[in-house]
Amino acid sequence: MQTCRRHLLLAASALGIGGRVHAHGNNDHRNQAATVRKEQKDWGIAGDATAVRRTIDVRMGDDMRFRPARIDVRQGETLRFRVHNNGRVMHEFVIGTPADNARHAELMAKFPDMEHDEPYMAHVPPGTTGVIVWTFNRAGRFEFACLIAGHYQAGMVGSIQVRAA
Ligand SMILES: [Cu+2]
């Protein structure tokens, strides 16, 4: 138990999200994390539903692919992603820089039970749909990825190109 906690803390500090990585079954903390925090990230900031002008449906499958695999955005746009899991196993949709996602995926491979929840990610059980509203206020090339152990490594990654306004 002690070792497990230490690993989670290491994982949390490596992610720079101190205290927001929880062991499975810790529902109290998960509820707290459900409150959307607006924190500027390199790849944007949590968006308001009222600002949404475009909704993008993304499908995820057990073939470890996203459809579409590329999304083009104008800087300043707020998008609603409806993320459908058509597979039989859990998948997730996590927006980030390629470097952040790669680092995060490595941690998920080491600590498969690590829970994480942020406004730029959706964890989608089989046969269900997750929703994210995100504002792309910074231009650049970003990614969406499934960071579940083995999925990212199998190529479950898509690209987001945000064109400068
Ligand atoms: Cu997946």
Image (tube, rainbow, N blue to C red):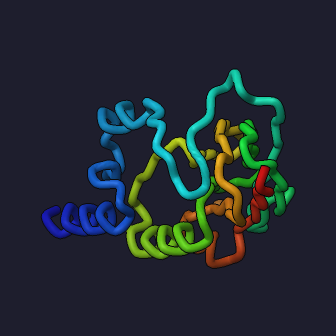
Q: Nearer the viewer, residue 31 or 17?
A: 17
Q: Is residue 68 left or right of residue 147?
A: right
Q: Quadrant of the N terminus?
A: bottom left
Q: Is residue 142 left or right of residue 161?
A: left
What number of labels is visible? Answer: 0
Q: Which residue shows up at 66% across the image and 41% down it?
A: 135
Find residue 142 and report its horizontal and vertical position in percent.
68, 63
| Residue 50, picture quadrant | top right
Q: Which residue shows up at 39% across the image and 37% down it?
A: 33
Q: Which residue shows up at 70% across the image and 68% down it?
A: 156
Find residue 36 and report its horizontal and vertical position in percent.
47, 33
Can residue 147 be seen at all in this image of the molecule? yes
- Ligand 1: give its quadrant: bottom right
Q: Nearer the viewer, residue 14 or 114?
A: 14
Q: Residue furthest left?
A: 2
Find residue 140 and report its horizontal and vertical position in percent.
70, 63
Can residue 61 be seen at all in this image of the molecule? no
Say if 139 sits above or below 45 in the image.
Answer: below
| Residue 56, picture quadrant | top right
Say if 4 sits above or below 75 in the image.
Answer: below
Q: Which residue shows up at 34% across the image and 44% down it?
A: 25
Q: Is residue 20 left or right of residue 34?
A: left
